Image (spheres, rainbow, N blue to C red):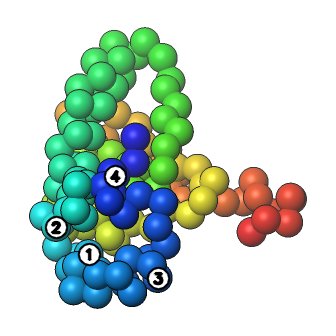
Amino acid sequence: REQHYGDWEGRSYEEVQAGTPELYARLMSGDLRFAPPGGESIADLLNRTRQVEALLRPMAEDHAADTMVVAHAGSIRALAVTLLKLPRSTFWRLKVSPASLSVISLYADGATVDLWNDTCHLEAAGER
């Protein structure tokens, strides 16, 4: 599940900026604790991804199966920060393009990035 934007759900950035410029400025400031009215912050999203890690890590340690996670960019960023044990401040430094592929391998003692933000599969379709 992607970050919940509360009262801003379904609105464009332009609409939010025009309606509440001071709150929009806080959103754009990079403050991970800021939450849109009625929504959740990036910090909340990061906390939520810990639950996903709790499901994925035992499967990886038991070599039970490869697992695919299909999600929105913010959720993928949050999961990567969580699995790789990166500082929360790196959240916005991870680019996630639409329909991109990323591979993170989990091990008992950590995780590795094997592929990140790959979009070569879109080239044949002329989407890139």
Question: What residue occupies the far front of the structure in this picture?
Answer: 19
Horizontal side of residue 89 vs 64, given as left or right = left
For disc 1, the marked residue is 27
Residue 16 x, y percent position in the rendering: 38, 77
Q: Are marks 1 and 2 in contact (CB under 8 Å)?
A: yes
Kindly state the secondary structure of the residue where label 2 is placed: loop
Mark 3 vs mark 1, CA separation in Å = 13 Å
The residue wearing badge 4 is 3
Residue 44 location, x and y as percent?
18, 50
Q: Quadrant of the C terminus?
A: bottom right
For residue 74, say whether it is visible: yes
Question: Which is more N-terminal, label 1 or label 4?
Answer: 4
In terms of secondary structure, where does tag 1 sit? helix
Any mark on residue 34, and which?
A: 2
Circle nearer the N terminus (2, 3): 3
Which residue has dot 3 on it? 14
Earlier residue among tags 3 and 1: 3
Q: Residue at x 35, y 17 (%)?
A: 59
